[in-house]
Amino acid sequence: MFPPPRNRNKKQKKNRARFILVSIATVVAVFALFAVGKWVFGTRNTAIDAKLLSFSATDDYTATQESLLFVRDDVLSCIDYADNEKWSVSLLTSGMNVEASTELAAAYDDTRVQIFTANGEPSASKEFYGTIVQVRCGDTLTAVLSADYENQNRVILLDMSGNEVARYEFEGKYILDFGFFEGDAFYIYMLDGGSVVPVSRLMTYSADLANTGNLTVESQILQHLVFLEDDLYAIGTNQIIEMDYVGSRLAEKLIYGWEYRDMMVKGGESIFLMVPGGESSGQSAISTARILEMGKRDTFAQMPSATMAVSLGSSRLYAYTADKIRKISLEGETISEHALPFEATGFKALPTEKHALCFVGEAVYIIKLP
C-alpha cells in the first residue's frame, strides 16, 4: 500500500497566503515605525538656547548681516550676534536714532547726521535745516529724507565726507519710502498727491546716480519692494507685480486682503510669506500663513494657536508663539517644535534668516533658528 499523494497545490496556496500575510505585516510595521519616528524625531520638542543682549527694547537699534547696532544714551555700540562688542563711539547728543548697512552706520536726530565706517571710525557729521525724517545707508553713500517748514519732502545724498552729491525733489508727490538695494544703487517710492486714485511711482538710480527706471503702479499703494538682480517685485495692496527695471510687467498675483511678512529666494525662485490683513500688527494671533511663488506654489498653512509672528529662512517657515518656535515645511507640515526658556512677548526675524530676536518685556534675547 502506498500513502495517498500529497496535495501540493494546497500546500503552495498555504505558503503563498502565509507569505502575503507576512509581507502585509512587514509593510504595516514599516509604516508604523515611520509614523512613530516622524512623531518622535520630526516633531520633537527640544529646547532653544537664548542669549540676553546688551541693549533693551527701548533702545533704538538696527541689524545687518553681521552685526547689531544700538544707541544707549549718547553712545553708539556695535556687537556681533554672540553679543561681543566690536566697537563703540560717542555721539553728539543722547537719544539719536541709528541706521546701518554692512559698510556704513549713521546716527541721527531731527537736525544732525553722524556717519561712521563699518569699523566705527568717524567719517562725517552734517547739520540740516528743517527736520530729518529718516536715513538710509549704502556702501559709500548716505541718503537723508528731509522736510522743511513747508513740509516739502526731499532726498539728499551724502558722500563719506558729508558732502552733498545729489538732491531729489518731486513736486506734488509724497515720498513714502527710499533706500539702497545693491551697494549704492538706490530707489525712491512716491505717491501722487493730486490723483483721485492711488498712483505709486518708483524711481531707481544706479550707483553713479544715473536714473535707471521710472515705474508706475496705478490704483494701489505698495506694501513692500523687493529688488533682485534682473527684476523687482512691487507688493501692493491688491497684487504682487513682477517687473523689470524698464517697467514692463512680467507676472502678477492677486493678494488682496493679505499682508506681506517675508520673502526668500530658493533655487532661483522667489517665495513670499503673507498673512491675513490685520494679523501682522502684533495685536491679534496669526491664523494662516500663505506661502506663494509667482505662477507656481500657493500654499495656505494653518498656524498653531496664538502664533505671534512668522518668518522664512533656510527653506523653512517659522511660527513663533510665546513658549515655542515651530519649524514648518513650505508645504505646511510641522517638522519640529522647540521650547523657549521664557514666555516671550514679541519676536523679530534678523537679516541672516538664521537668527531672531525674542523680547521678554524690555529684555532682548537672540536665538539661532533651528
Image (cartoon, helix red, strand yellow):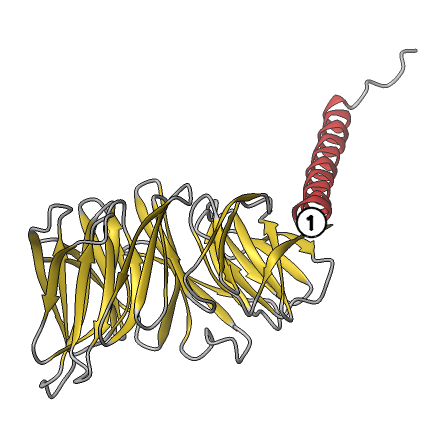
Q: In the rendered view, would you say 130 is above or below 83?
A: below
Where in the figure is residue 133, as x and y percent of width and height? 29, 72
Name the outermost residue toward the right. 1
Depth check: give the residue in front, 91 or 220: 91
- Residue 332 seen: yes
Q: Which residue is mark 1?
A: 49
Whether residue 331 is visible here, answered yes or no, is no
Residue 199 in the image: x percent, y percent? Answer: 13, 77
Residue that appears at 8% across and 57% down: 213
Of all residues shown, which one is farthest toward the top?
A: 1
Q: Is residue 135 above or below residue 146?
A: above
Q: Nearer the viewer, residue 104 or 243?
A: 104
Whether residue 34 is situated above or below residue 15 in the rendered picture: below
Quarter assignment of residue 5: top right
| Observer-nearest of 4 and 188 | 188
Q: Residue at x 86, y 19 (%)?
A: 4
Q: How many marks?
A: 1
Q: Position of residue 137 (x, y in %)?
A: 30, 54
Three-letter amino acid code at the position of disc 1:
Asp
SS of the residue at dot 1? loop
Neighbours of disc 1 within 10 Å: few (<14), some (14-19), many (20+): some
